Amino acid sequence: MSCFRPLCLALALAVAGCRNDAPTGEVDKPIAPSMQATIDAYTAPNGWLDAAGVLELAAAVTQRTTVIDSLAIDVRVLDAARAAIAQLSQQAGVQGPAVFPQALSAEPVAVSSQALTVAGEGFLVVTRICDGWDVVPIASLANGTMQLTVGFTEQGVDPVVWGSLALCKYRLNERFIQLDGRAVDRSRGDVRVYVGSNVTTMTFGTFVEPVLVELEAQLVLDGVEVGGALSFQIDVNTRALAMLVPLSTGNVVVSLDAARLGAVVRAGNGTFACDLAAQRCTAPDGSTIGAP
C-alpha cells in the first residue's frame, strides 16, 4: 500500500506577544475554502426518491463506492497532515512555542507525545511525493505530488484541510490509481477534507465524527477514467460511508455500513431502507418502490 513519501514541509507561523504587545511576526495565512454548501446538502438532501430514482441509484452507488474504496483519498490526505503536525509538534517541543518560518526535515516522523503550543496562528504547506505503481513503492517526482495546506491556531487545527493533486500515481493493493486535479477555482484546491471544528493537534487523526471529502480530479483507475467529482463522508475508524448522489430530482444521501451491505437513503421525501442490488427500496410507511 502506498504511503506517499517523502514528506516536505514548510511552516509559517504568526507568534503573538503579551496581550497588549504587538505581534512578533506576521503571516499571510491562506483562507480555507468553504465547504458549507456541501455540509448543508448532507444535512438536508433535496432529491425526491421515486421508482425511477431507485433505478438511477443502483448503478451510481455501485460505481461510486468502488471508486471511493479504491482511492482511499481520505487516508492519504489525513496521513500526510498528521505526519506534518507531528513533525511540527516535535520542533515546538524542542524550540518552545515561538517557532518561526523555516524548512523542516523531510525525515520520517513519529507521533509526538507533547502537545503543540502556539500563540497566534499559522499554517503548514505539506508536499507528498507519490510512490508510483511499482511493486516496491519508490517516491519520485515523476510519479506526481499532493500538496496540502493545514491551518492552525492556538485553539487547534482549522476545520478544512485542502490542497492540489498533480498526476499523482499510487497503488492500493492491486489497484493502480492516478489523480490529476481539475478544480475550476484553483484557490479551492482539488481535494478538500472537513475534519470538524474541535480538532486539536493531539487528537488529529482520532476523529469521533466522520470526515467530509470533496474531490475534483481526473480519476484514472486501472487505466480507465472513472469520473471527475466526488463527495462523501467516511468514518475513518470503521470505514462506514455516506455519499451525496445527484439524481434527476436533486441530491440524495446514501449511507452504507462498513461491509457495504445495508443501504439507507435520505431524500427530501423521507428515509428509505434499500436493497440496491435488487433495485428496491422500502419507505417509512412500509410501501416499496423500484423493481417489483
Image: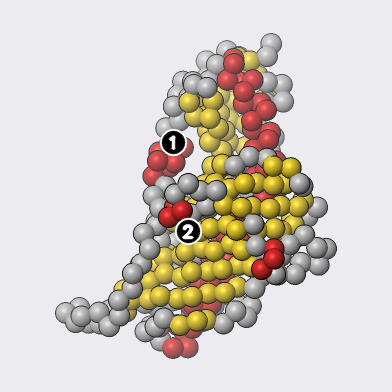
- The residue drawn where x is 36% and y is 67% is 29
Note whether residue 51 is visible.
yes
* Tag 1: amino acid: Ala
Q: CA distance from mark 1 to mark 2?
A: 19 Å
State the image quarter where residue 141 is shown: bottom right
Q: Which residue does the numbered mark 2 point to in the structure image? A: 161
- SS label for mark 1: helix
Is 138 or 58 nearer to us in this picture?
138
Q: Is residue 110 above or below residue 204?
A: below
Residue 261 point in image, percent of width and height: 69, 34
Q: Which mark is residue 41?
A: 1
Identify the image quadrant of the C terminus.
Answer: top right
Residue 93 point in image, percent of width and height: 47, 84
Q: Is residue 228 above or below residue 146?
A: above
Extreme residue toward the left, this view: 20
Is 208 or 181 nearer to us in this picture?
181
Task: Report whether 292 appears left or right of 236.
Answer: right
Residue 14 point in image, percent of width and height: 33, 76
